[in-house]
Image (cartoon, rainbow, N blue to C red):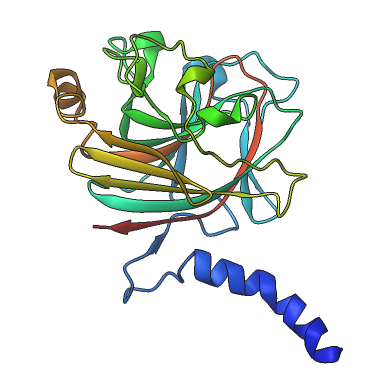
Amino acid sequence: MKIRFLFLLFLPWLFLTTAFPQDTPENGWISLFNGNDLTGWKVQCTPPDQDKQFWTVKDGAIDCNSLGRPDHDYVWLIQQGEYGDFELRLQFQAFRDSPGNSGVQVRSRFEASTDAPRGGWMDGPQVDIHPPTPWRTGLIYDETREERRWIAPSLPDWNIDSTYAPEKWSFRYSDQGRGWNDLRVVCEGTRIRTYLNGLVMTDFDGSGVLDNAAHRKHNVGLTGHVALQLHTGDELHIRYRNLRIRPL
C-alpha cells in the first residue's frame, strides 16, 4: 500500500518531465519563463493602456486577467528572444467564465509608430486560443496589418464558423482532468504545424503567404518574436506555464 501511495505521488512529476524535456544545452531546449517573474518579457500596447496591469506572475504561471476590465486595446506580452525555425512547447489553462480571446504569436514584431494601426501593432501569424469556441484553438490567424485574416484555414477575413473545425480536437477547461492544455508549435521555413493535446490542429504550407511582400516589409512570418495576446476589448483570464523553445 505504501509503495502504491508513493507511485501516485510520483506520477505528476513523471508526466511533466516526459512531456516537457528538461532545459539543458545538451537537448537544445531553452526555457522562456523562469516561473518567478517576467524577466525576458516585455508588455507592448498603445499609450492609454500602459499603466494598466493585465500580465502578472501567480503561482508559477504567467497570468493574464482582464475580467471586469474590457476597456483596453490589444495588450501583448512579448518574449525578447528572436527565432526563425523552432519547436515551441507550452501549457495553458482556460476558464469557463472567461469569454475573451488569446493566442500565441510566432515570428512576429510589434511596431509603435504613427504608421502602425492604432499607433501600435503586432505583425505576424498567431496560433489562436479561444476558450468560448475551443475548436478554434490551434488554427492560425495572421495579424499582419495587410492580411488580418485566417490563413489556416485560408479565409478572406476574421469570420470563421464550426464548419472549419478540425475533425478531431481536444480541449480542457481548468475544472477538467488536470486542467491544463499542451500546445506545441513547429515552424520550419514556410511550414507551421500546431498540436493541441497531442492532436494535429494545423499543418500549414505558408509558401506565398508568410514570405510575401507584406511579411517581408515587416520582417515577420519567417523570423521574429514569440508573444502572448490579450485581445482588444475582451474580458480574458488565461494562464501560461512551461514555455520552452528549441531552435531547429
Against 38, residue 157 (above or below) is: above
Residue at (53%, 19%) from the top-left corner?
A: 162
Image position of 89 with respect to 236: above or below: below
Name the residue: 29% across, 40% down: 192
In this rendering, is residue 180 above or below 226? below
Is 137 or 47 nearer to us in this picture? Answer: 137
Residue at far front of view? 167
Q: Where's residue 146, x and y in %?
A: 26, 12
Q: In the picture, residue 148 is in which quadrant?
A: top left
* Left or right of residue 94: residue 192: left
Q: Residue at x 74, y 46 (%)?
A: 176
Answer whether residue 17 is visible to the viewer in this image.
yes
Task: Name the residue nearer the viewer: 149 or 227.
Answer: 149
Residue 16 position in % (x across, y down): 58, 67
Q: Is residue 116 above or below residue 227?
A: above
- Front residue of 171/242: it is 171
Residue 164: quarter of image? top left
Left or right, 235 with reference to 196:
right
Residue 3 in the figure: left or right of residue 69: right
User: Residue 32's x, y, as percent?
Assistant: 44, 55
Q: Is residue 64 visible?
A: no
Q: Position of residue 106 (x, y in %)?
A: 35, 38
